[in-house]
Amino acid sequence: LKAPARRPIATASVEAQTPTTDNQFYIKNGAVDALMVENDGEVVVLAGSRISPTVSESAQKSGYNKTLRPYLFEHKHVDEQTHTFLHDYPFKSVSAAAEVILGRSANGRTEWKSCQNHASYAKTKAAELE
C-alpha cells in the first residue's frame, strides 16, 4: 500500500500530494483516497480527500455516518458528485474521520497509516512515546 502524496487544494486527487510533516496519515481503499493531518491533537481531513460513495447498511443506522456524513453533504463540505472534501475539515477523533471516509464502522487508530512509514496511527503514536 502506497501513501498518497500531498497536492494543492485545487486538484482532484490526494495521490498528487507530497507529505510535509510526520503527522500526516492516509487511508486508501478502493474509491477512498484520503489524507489527514494531526496538529496539537486536532484531526483535520484535507481538501481533496475522497470518501466512499457508499455507506454500509449498519453504519446508516448509527454513529457518524447517520449524523455527520449527511451534514457534510448538506453544508457543502463534501461534493455530492465526486465525494470529495471541498476544504480541510476538522474531526473530533481519528475514528470519527475514518468512519465517515470509509462509510462503515472503523477504528481510526488502525485504519489511518503514516505517510512516512505506513505504520498504523496507533503504532506511530506509540513510537513517539518511546
Image (spheres, rainbow, N blue to C red):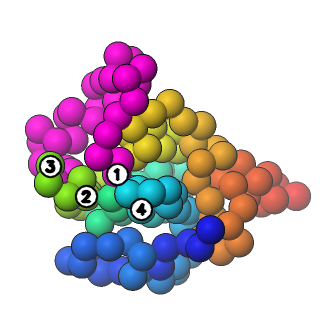
Residue at label 2? 84
**Which structural element holds mark 1?**
loop
Q: Which mark is residue 80?
A: 3
Please state the horizontal and vertical placement of residue 105, each as a whole percent of the image. 50, 30
For the residues labelled 3 and 4, the Cα–Cα distance comes to 16 Å
Please state the horizontal and vertical placement of residue 70, each as a whole percent of the image. 21, 33
- The quadrant of the image that shows the C terminus is bottom right
Residue at label 4? 33
Q: Residue at x 21, y 41 (%)?
A: 72
Assess whether residue 3 is covered by the magenta stretch.
Answer: no
For the residues labelled 2 and 1, the Cα–Cα distance comes to 6 Å
Q: Which residues are magenta?
A: 51-79
For the residues labelled 1 and 4, the Cα–Cα distance comes to 7 Å
For the residues labelled 4 and 2, the Cα–Cα distance comes to 9 Å
**Amino acid of disc 3:** Glu
For the residues labelled 2 and 3, the Cα–Cα distance comes to 8 Å
Q: Residue at x 47, y 51 (%)?
A: 43
Of 82 and 88, nearer the camera is: 82
Q: Tell me which label, 3 or 1, sits earlier in the chain.
A: 1
Q: Residue at x 14, y 54 (%)?
A: 81
Residue at label 1? 51
Looking at the image, the residue that sits furthest to the right is 130
- Contact check, label 4 and label 2, Cβ < 8 Å: no
Assess whether residue 66 is covered by the magenta stretch.
Answer: yes
- Contact check, label 3 and label 4, Cβ < 8 Å: no
Vertical placement of residue 101 versus 8, above or below: above
Q: Tell me which label, 2 or 1, sits earlier in the chain.
A: 1
**Amino acid of disc 1:** Ile
Please state the horizontal and vertical placement of residue 115, each as a whole percent of the image. 59, 71
Q: Tell me which label, 1 or 4, sits earlier in the chain.
A: 4
Of 83 and 20, nearer the camera is: 83
